[in-house]
Image (cartoon, rainbow, N blue to C red):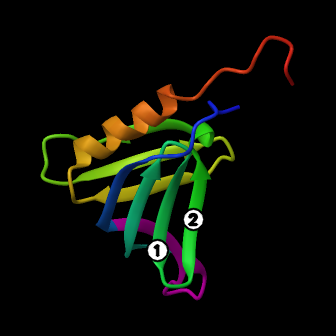
Amino acid sequence: PRCPSPPAVLFWSPRCELVRVDGADGSDGRQEPNLRLIRAGLLLTTAQLCVLADAGNAYVMDIASVQAVEEARSRPSALVTIASTSGHIWQIHVRDEPGEFVAHLRRARSLLCSAPAGAV
């Protein structure tokens, strides 16, 4: 359960990219993985991580479902990998303040309240 407080915006950037894996026809007619970058906005609140991929697609992940975050450092941008509890791996290329995004994501995770003893 979360602390009883309204969600607050921690980070917003319209200059991110989502790494998407699509099937592409290989030379022998089989589907092969094809990586492509999709322009995306990234909104992080104390409750959710939202990836706004385009006008018709938004991906929302509860902060509690974020298991791990890795960041490539020493670059003006970062490729952030997020593992969710559902088994999905998200890769997001963050151009604006990559270290700030990761710090805020870790902060949001630390703000989660623990369930009272005996709660299910």
Residue 53 visible in this rendered orientation of the protein: yes
| SS category of the residue bearing label 1 | strand
Specify few, some or many for label 2: CA neighbours under 10 Å numbering under 14, 14-19, or 20 or more: few
Number of labels in the image equals 2
Q: Is residue 61 above or below residue 108?
A: below
Residue 36 in the image: state x and y as whole percent. 39, 74
Is residue 88 toward the left or the right of residue 110 in the image? Answer: right
| SS category of the residue bearing label 2 | strand
Q: Quadrant of residue 103?
A: top left
The numbered disc on residue 6 is none
Instruction: Give the quadrant of the C terminus.
Output: top right
Q: Which residue is mark 2?
A: 59
Q: Is residue 26 magenta?
A: yes
Q: Which region is colored magenta?
A: 17-32
Q: Quadrant of residue 42?
A: bottom left
Residue 30 in the image: state x and y as whole percent. 60, 82
Mark 1 and mark 2: span between their CA atoms? 8 Å
The numbered disc on residue 53 is 1
Q: Is residue 120 above or below residue 28?
A: above
Are the residues at dot 1 and dot 2 in contact (C-beta closer than 8 Å)?
A: yes
Amino acid of disc 2: Tyr
Is residue 81 toward the left or the right of residue 57 in the image? Answer: left
Q: Is residue 23 above or below residue 93?
A: below
Residue that appears at 47% across and 70% down: 52
Q: Quadrant of residue 70?
A: top left
Residue 100 in the image: state x and y as whole percent. 26, 42
Residue that appears at 47% across and 48% down: 45
